[in-house]
Amino acid sequence: MTLHFLRLALGLGVVAALVGCSDTSFEAGKPSASSSKGGDAKGDKSGLGGDDGGGGAGGDNDLLATDEEDGSSRRIEKSFELAKVAGKVDMVWLIDTSGSMREEAAHVQRNFASFAATLSSRTNTRTTLIANPATNGDIGVTLPPGGVDQNQISTPIGSRNALAVAAAAVCPSNLSSVAGNNATICGEAISGVENANAIPTIAGRLKSSNFFRPGAKPVFVIVTDDDASGVTAANFVRLVQPHLNNEAPTVYSFRGQTSRNNCDVARPGAAYDALAAATSGRAFDICDTDWSPNFATLGQAVAELANTSFVMDTGIKSVLKVVVDGRELSSGDYTVTGNRIELRKGVVSADAKSLKIVYQSAPK
């Protein structure tokens, strides 16, 4: 009898143990607090789903899983098809139409229409041409018909005052004036401005028309066979940038270096060389016999410049990676301001196809 009860007790114990094991396995199979938030996905913090360009700031191990919240911050990925991103460019051309500039003005006239059409097909470009029109045999340049978002201000540009005229046009009209031989431009006393009589007629013209749009890249192109006076490389950017929605301008030029090819240069354009270097622009040789390649290079550079600024949906706590056509950029290739990422000029070619930005959002 005792042996019978002993066998029964042992049997019941085995059953209980089996039931206990079954219950334990069931509980383990339930989604846990951690697995409900992504399970293994949290272990792979890259959340990228593929190898597309490296580890970003600090490597993939520093990335949060896609859409995973970290307090009030989360990892966000934005992709752009660059061919469909028409970056904004506000471009101002200033053409010296003094007596020595007939052939150079003709070069601009011949190349402008195709240049403007090509650039408009790749960017959202607004253009103002400041120059005398080519009428009745006068030296000048006239905007071709049919252009999109183009305007001409008929004001003569002298040999050395192109930068002064540009600055006066950008600033509010009440900040620029001329009294005798003294000029005030953008609220600053400027000495040595030649042909200063053009300042009152141009003052505030671009400002009053709201020509420069927020988020657009301001571009200036000057064509002259002389150097600048009064407003030069030393003060041009300082004068105009506060009135360009605080966007840094880029300056290109067709300027003289030395006389050649039956081309006379009044003075080398040292101010324009310095501005090209300071603003990551470019200076072309006015004595080149064929300007078509230079216009093509200018168009390529401006198209690349247009696709350098990208606005995110939220504030940015940190950028985790920026990838262009599968190539990851270094942290020195971009800057962050608020919710905008600005790529360094020249980092993205005009022919680039895709851009991906991965960032951690700033706490709300």
Image (cartoon, rainbow, N blue to C red):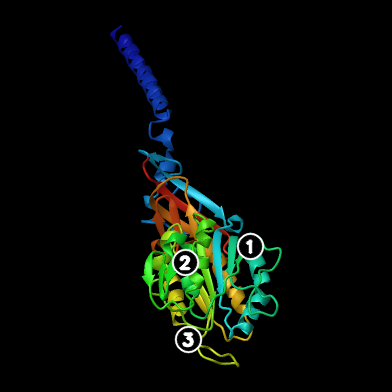
**Residue 200 in the image: x percent, y percent?**
49, 67
The amino acid type of the residue labelled 2 equals Ala
Dot 1, crowdedness within 10 Å: few (<14), some or many (≥20)? many
Determine the secondary structure under disc 1.
helix
Identified at 49% across, 55% down, the residue is 215
What is the number of the mark on residue 268?
Answer: 3
Point out the tag, 3 or 1, that comes first from the N-terminus: 1
**314 sits to left or right of 109:** left
Reading the image, the residue beneath label 2 is: 168
Residue at 47% across, 82% down? 227
Q: In the rendered view of the protein, which quadrant contains the C terminus?
A: top left
Q: Quadrant of the N terminus?
A: top left
Q: Earlier in the sequence, mark 3 or mark 2?
A: 2
**Kind of residue at badge 3:** Pro
Query: Marks 3 and 2: which is nearer the front?
Result: 2
Residue under pointer 1:
120
SS at badge 3: loop
Residue 191 drawn above or below residue 324: below
Which quarter of the figure has residue 171? bottom left
Label 3 to label 2, Cα distance in Å? 24 Å
Q: Is residue 221 rendered to the left or right of residue 289? A: left
Of label 1 and label 2, which has the lower sequence position?
1
